[in-house]
Image (cartoon, rainbow, N blue to C red):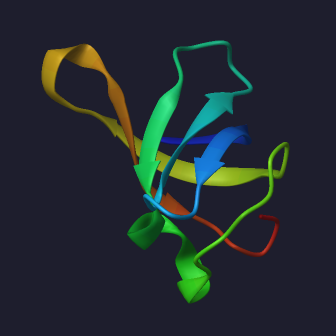
């Protein structure tokens, strides 16, 4: 599922973070490997498109964050 969102939290040392989707659905977890373009750090409140899917126990997982706007 493609959507838009902004970074709520990112921990570069642990290589994970959370995005708040613009559609008001629950936070999306993502690992640093999901950031397109190989960036390893993104700033809080950065925004842009993402591709996500519903993971175990109904939580959203980010598959690809498009680095052009992150």
- The quarter of the rendered structure image containing the N terminus is top left
| Residue depicted at x 72% and y 64% | 42
**Spot occupied by residue 58 in the image (x, y as percentages of width and height):** 24, 16
| Residue depicted at x 54% and y 87% | 38
| Residue depicted at x 45% and y 62% | 15
Q: Quadrant of residue 41?
A: bottom right
Count of marks, rendered view: 0
42 w.r.t. 52: above or below:
below
The answer to whether residue 22 is left or right of residue 34 is: right
Q: Is residue 4 visible?
A: no
- The quarter of the rendered structure image containing the C terminus is bottom right
**Spot occupied by residue 30 in the image (x, y as percentages of width and height):** 44, 49
- For the residue pair 41 and 1, the one nearer the viewer reads as 41
Q: Give the residue at the far left of this rendering.
A: 56
| Residue depicted at x 78% and y 75% | 68
Q: Is residue 67 visible?
A: yes
């Amino acid at each position: 599922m493609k959507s838009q969102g902004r970074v709520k939290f990112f921990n570069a040392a642990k290589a994970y973070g959370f995005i708040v989707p613009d559609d008001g659905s629950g936070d999306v977890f993502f690992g640093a490997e999901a950031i397109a373009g190989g960036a390893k750090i993104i700033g809080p409140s950065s925004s842009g498109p993402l591709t996500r899917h519903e993971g175990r126990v109904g939580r959203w997982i980010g598959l690809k964050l498009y680095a052009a706007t992150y």
